[in-house]
Every structure is written in C-alpha cells, then in structure tokens.
C-alpha cells in the first residue's frame, strides 16, 4: 500500500516553474491585445470618435477584471451544474485558492490559469464595441459589458472549456476561442446593432478611417499578442502542441492577409493597408479554434479560406442594411464560424486530440459536432445580446442624440478630443514671412 501511495504521489503533477513563467508571459501578451484592439478600432473611426472608441475597449479592462475576481471565474470554471454553468465558493473573490494549488491536472497554479482566462474575458466584450462606433452612450456601454459578460460570456466559456460543460463534453474543439470569443462577440455585435440601428449618414456620408498608421499599429500588436492567446491555451508546452499552435498562428495569418489582398486587387483594383490589417485579423480569428488540430499546410488552407470569406462578408452590411461600423460581424463572426467548422475538415488526429476531420478519414462526425457548437453559441449570444440591448435602450437609452452624434461623441461623452489641430502647422501663429502652404489632399481630415 505504501508503495502504491508513493507511486501515485510521484505521478501527480508537480509545479513547473517553466510552464508557470511561460503562462504569465502569455497572460501579459493577451492583456496587450485589448489596448492593441483599441488602437486598431481607434484608427478606423472618424476623428470625432477616436477617444470614445479607445475607451470602449479600455473600460473592459476595469469592469471585467473586477467581475472576474468577484464571481466570473467561479461561474466559468467552477464545479459544473447541469452542464450549463459552474460554481465553486473557493473561487469567489479568489479567496479560497492556495498560492501553490495546481490547476486541474496541469503544472501551473490556479492563480495563473485564472489570470490567463481573465484576459480572454476582457477582450471578448471589447471586440463587440467596433460594431457600435460613433453612437453609443458610454454609461450604457459600461452597463452592457457588465450584464453581457455575466449572462453570456461566463456561461458560454463554461460550455466550451469548463469541465462538465455540454459542448466540452460533446467533443467540440475550440482550442483558444473561436466559439467562446469570436462567434460569441460577433453574434452579440449583430444582436446589438439590430436593436440600436444605423449611424447618422450610413451609406450616404464618407466614414473613412482617420488614421491608417494607427490601424496598422493595432493590427501588428494584435498579431504579436495573439501568440500568447493561442500558444498559451495549451497551458504549457511539454508535449509540443503549443509550438504547433504558434507556428500555425503565424502561417494562417500570413495566408489570410494574402488572400484578402488578392481578393481586394481583383475586386477593387488596389492593395490597401486596411485590407492587409483586416486580412491578418481574419486569419488570427480563424486559426484560433482550429490551429491545435491541423498541420501547417492545413493552417495555410484555413487562413486563405477565412481571408477570402471575410473579405467578401464585410460588404454584406451594405446589401442587408445593418450598420456594423468596423466589420466585427464580417471578420469575427464569419472568421470564427469558418475556423470552427474547418476543424471538421482539416483536423489531423495527431496534434491536440485524436479527432480527425473529413479530409483525414474522420468522416462527418467532427464536422457535425463543430456545427452544433457554432450555431448554439451564435444563437444564444445573438438573442441574449439583443434582449440586453433592448432593455438598456428602453430604460436609460443606448444611443446619444442625433445632434451629439453629428457633432462628435468624443466631446459629448468624454469632454476631450483626440487631436489638437489649433497649433499644428502654425494656425494663427503664421506670419506674413511664413505664408501657409496650399492645402493638399493629404491634409484633409474626414471628421
């Protein structure tokens, strides 16, 4: 008996300093993605909405962090109840967790897992904000985040990743958040914009990005942070799966960017910086659920397919008349659906699990599971988000007034402007000895 006990103790997972350090770095990388998203979205809006767009992402860092500590981690990863939600009193306030207590058979502390998953919870509602640019009250947005993560994100995270969650138990593969993050956020964005309506001047006024360099900076930082998002989701790299995911993240993103640019060139005649940035994000979205189950060649295919589909999808808002300001539906919803379903085609059975897709002799079984996960999360998030938006709109109002929207939401909601043009280029300080240069196209600002 003593020998058996000794053997069991020896086989039990031991705290790994290497994996713990790796996961803390990955957590910091995922945290960086929320400010990166703020830059990405902030550059895509008009000048008068820049600060509001930045703040709609930044406020998620505050609200979701506090909710996660109070009860979010418990709801998402506590002991399962009915395959729908979790709850563990030790996780409430993170007060009953030992500092060296390991997470569920892994070699990292519970605290490390909790903070890593916190960063996922933070960025998911921030993703929604891009669809609502220019027109939402900041207080209403803060309330929406509070209700949405509580009633939508925490339960869905449990379904997908929590032990006992019904999609987890079914065998739906979502390595790092295609369903729980991107489909969830994209469907929520669609639900909210169907309630609050279009921007003033939609399809009539030019609504061009005011700073493409800011967009490219945000996209580059997202790409960088996404390695922590994806590779870190294996919670260590003792068996090489995290390394495969790292490689596939790079490969799929590159392929998606090239596919988007090729479509853009054929369709519109130009290679644009906005297209390059959007294509890269589309690839990152699509490989997030699928990169742990496919080969690098499969990652190229997944990225290229997603880049093409998302490039085509962003124009649907003009055809169907919904105002998805910054293409959250076209990139995150469509990219998340594509990446999640393509697991059912490209899963090799030799990386994160033995599940095989159709192209590797697995038949349609895994594709069917993926479809259930995709449409369950999509439907729940769409309906629940629309209901929350409707309740907030009917009680305190979701939108600023039309006059405030036209004049600029930054000044109205934040009493600030992103840029001070009064001293730029001289202004009233110009003298006769230094006459103003004639205006050029590059000096025009679409406010």
Image (tube, rainbow, N blue to C red):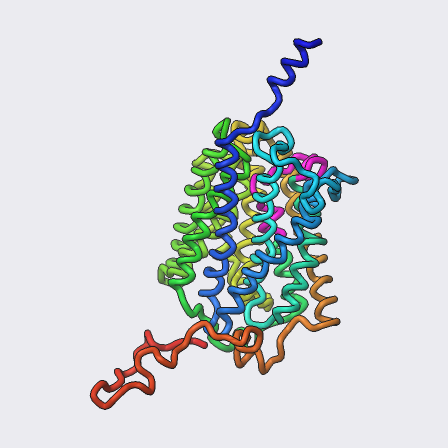
Q: Nearer the viewer, residue 297 or 411?
A: 411
Q: Is residue 199 visible?
A: yes
The quarter of the picture where the N terminus appears is: top right
Q: Nearer the viewer, residue 303 or 368?
A: 303
Q: Is residue 263 left or right of residue 125?
A: left
Residues in magenta? Answer: 162-184
- Position of residue 268 relative to residue 442, above or below, is above
Query: Could you tell me residue 152's position as x and y percent?
Result: 69, 53
Q: Is residue 165 left or right of residue 185?
A: right
- The residue lying at 55 percent from left, 71 percent from top is 134
Query: Could you tell me residue 41's position as x and y percent?
Result: 49, 62
Q: Nearer the viewer, residue 105 or 69?
A: 69
20 is within the stretch colored magenta: no
Quadrant of residue 423 in the image?
bottom left
Q: Nearer the viewer, residue 337 or 43?
A: 43
- The residue lying at 55 percent from left, 62 percent from top is 130
């Amino acid at each position: 008996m003593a020998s058996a006990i000794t053997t069991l103790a020896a086989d039990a997972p031991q705290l790994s300093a290497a994996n713990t350090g790796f996961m803390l770095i990955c957590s910091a990388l995922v945290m960086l993605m929320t400010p990166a998203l703020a830059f990405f979205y902030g550059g895509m809006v008009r000048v008068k909405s820049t600060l509001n767009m930045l703040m709609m992402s930044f406020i998620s860092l505050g609200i979701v962090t506090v909710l996660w500590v109070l009860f979010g981690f418990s709801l998402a990863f506590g002991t399962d109840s009915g395959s729908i939600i979790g709850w563990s009193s030790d996780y409430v306030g993170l007060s009953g967790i030992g500092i060296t207590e390991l997470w569920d058979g892994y070699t990292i502390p519970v605290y490390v897992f909790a903070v890593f998953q916190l960063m996922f919870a933070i960025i998911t509602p921030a993703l929604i904000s891009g669809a609502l640019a220019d027109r939402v009250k900041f207080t209403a947005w803060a309330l929406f985040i509070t209700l949405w993560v509580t009633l939508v994100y925490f339960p869905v995270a449990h379904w997908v990743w929590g032990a006992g969650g019904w999609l987890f138990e079914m065998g739906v593969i979502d390595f790092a958040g295609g369903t729980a993050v991107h489909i969830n956020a994209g469907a929520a964005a669609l639900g909210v914009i169907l309630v609050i309506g279009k921007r003033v001047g939609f399809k009539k006024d030019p609504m061009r990005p005011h700073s493409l360099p800011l967009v490219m900076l945000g996209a580059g930082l997202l790409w960088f942070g996404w390695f922590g998002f994806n590779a870190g989701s294996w919670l260590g790299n003792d068996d090489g799966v995290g390394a495969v995911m790292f490689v596939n993240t790079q490969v799929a993103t590159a392929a998606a960017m090239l596919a988007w640019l090729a479509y853009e060139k054929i369709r519109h005649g130009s290679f644009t910086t906005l297209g390059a940035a959007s294509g890269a994000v589309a690839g990152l979205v699509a490989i997030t659920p699928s990169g742990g189950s496919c080969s690098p060649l499969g990652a190229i295919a997944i990225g290229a397919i997603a880049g093409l589909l998302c490039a085509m999808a962003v124009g649907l808002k003009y055809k169907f008349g919904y105002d998805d300001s910054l293409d959250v539906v076209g990139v995150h919803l469509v990219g998340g659906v594509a990446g999640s379903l393509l697991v059912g085609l490209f899963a090799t059975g030799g990386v994160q699990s033995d599940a095989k897709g159709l192209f590797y002799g697995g038949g349609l079984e895994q594709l069917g599971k993926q479809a259930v996960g995709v449409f369950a999360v999509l439907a729940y998030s769409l309906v629940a988000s629309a209901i929350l938006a409707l309740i907030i709109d009917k009680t305190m109002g979701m939108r600023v007034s039309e006059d405030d929207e036209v004049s600029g939401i930054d000044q109205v909601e934040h009493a600030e402007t992103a840029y001070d043009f009064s001293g730029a280029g001289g202004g009233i300080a110009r003298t006769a000895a230094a006459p103003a240069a004639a205006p050029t196209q590059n000096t025009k600002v679409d406010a």
